[in-house]
Image (cartoon, grey):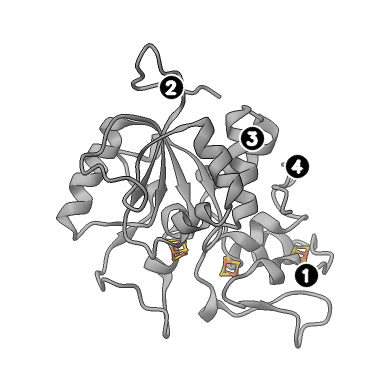
Amino acid sequence: MTFHRVSFEDDDLKLKIGFIHFSSCSGCQVAFLDMFEDAVEIFDTVELVYSNLLTKRKEIPYMDVAFVEGAFCAEDPHHVKLIKELSEKAGMVIAIGGCAAFGGMRRFSCGSQMPQPSHQTFIPLTEIESIKRKVKFAIPGCPPNPSLLYNFFLAFLERNDDFLLPFEFIAQSRDASGFDLIKEVVNKGFCVGCGTCSTACPSRAISFKDVCGKPNFDADLCVRCGSCLAACPQSFKPYPQPVYT
Ligand code: SF4
Ligand code: SF4
Ligand code: SF4
């Protein structure tokens, strides 16, 4: 894996990171802050150059790594400008959460889970031509577990490729919903009925009622966050699994 530095000053070798916000609830960025003292440790190690929540800066500066939450809205001129800036100013993009990685709540909402603002066209970063080559990793969840974010961040700073591989896989495959769990794990006979998918699901789309020993999936509740497939010990074979602590 190569880490391409776009811009850094001679006397400052800290990794420059930023948080970029598209259409989202900001829950993914807040999940970073839920790390509490671990977040302080991380923000001590890197240089936070931009965040709509944490910095006062109006202009988006050059940065080595952009952590991006939310889905791109093709009907929003501000988003069109933002995606252009991102493609020019970020060395690498990491999609945080289901909205940025798969469209999540923005694209697949139904019933009482309608997205706001109520545009028709939401696109995850992994599908935008001008930016998708820069999306090296995608972190599943709605929002991702703060412990998972912390472990990802440590692995990223330490260049722990073994740990990072599933996240790279998720960014490339984009198939990480409850549907894919059923198709890739349950229907292929890999499921061992451990229940991890059910506890990882934020919308209670997976239960164990009615189906003996195997997960019961309610498609109407799934927001395509990818947590179930990422947490399942029987998925992504032969890839190592992210560690939830
Ligand atoms: S993935 Fe979930 S928590 Fe993150 S921005 Fe989207 S709706 Fe909010
Ligand atoms: S079933 Fe649950 S955990 Fe899996 S993608 Fe859907 S909402 Fe996320
Ligand atoms: S996490 Fe995987 S193995 Fe465990 S019950 Fe769910 S589908 Fe089956």
Q: What's the CA distance linking mark 4 and mark 1?
A: 20 Å
Mark 4 or 3, closer to the camera: 3
Which kind of residue does numbered mark 4 sit on? Answer: Pro
Give how far across and how far down residue 70 sits, in percent: 38, 57
Query: Which of the two labelled residues, at mark 3 and mark 2, occupies the earlier sequence position?
Result: 2
Give how far across and how far down residue 242 sits, in percent: 69, 47
Query: Which of the two labelled residues, at mark 4 and mark 1, occupies the earlier sequence position?
Result: 1
Q: What's the CA distance linking mark 1 and mark 3?
A: 27 Å
Mark 3 or 2, closer to the camera: 3
Which kind of residue does numbered mark 1 sit on? Answer: Gly
The crowd level at tag 4 (other Cα within 10 Å; few <14, some 14-19, many 20+) is few
Q: Which residue is mark 3?
A: 155
Classify mark 1: helix, strand or loop: loop
Mark seen at residue 4:
2
Q: What's the CA distance linking mark 2 and mark 4?
A: 28 Å
Mark 2 or 1, closer to the camera: 2
Q: Residue furthest top?
A: 10
Residue 25 visible somewhere in the drawing: yes
Mark 2 or 4, closer to the camera: 2
Q: What's the CA distance linking mark 2 and mark 1?
A: 40 Å
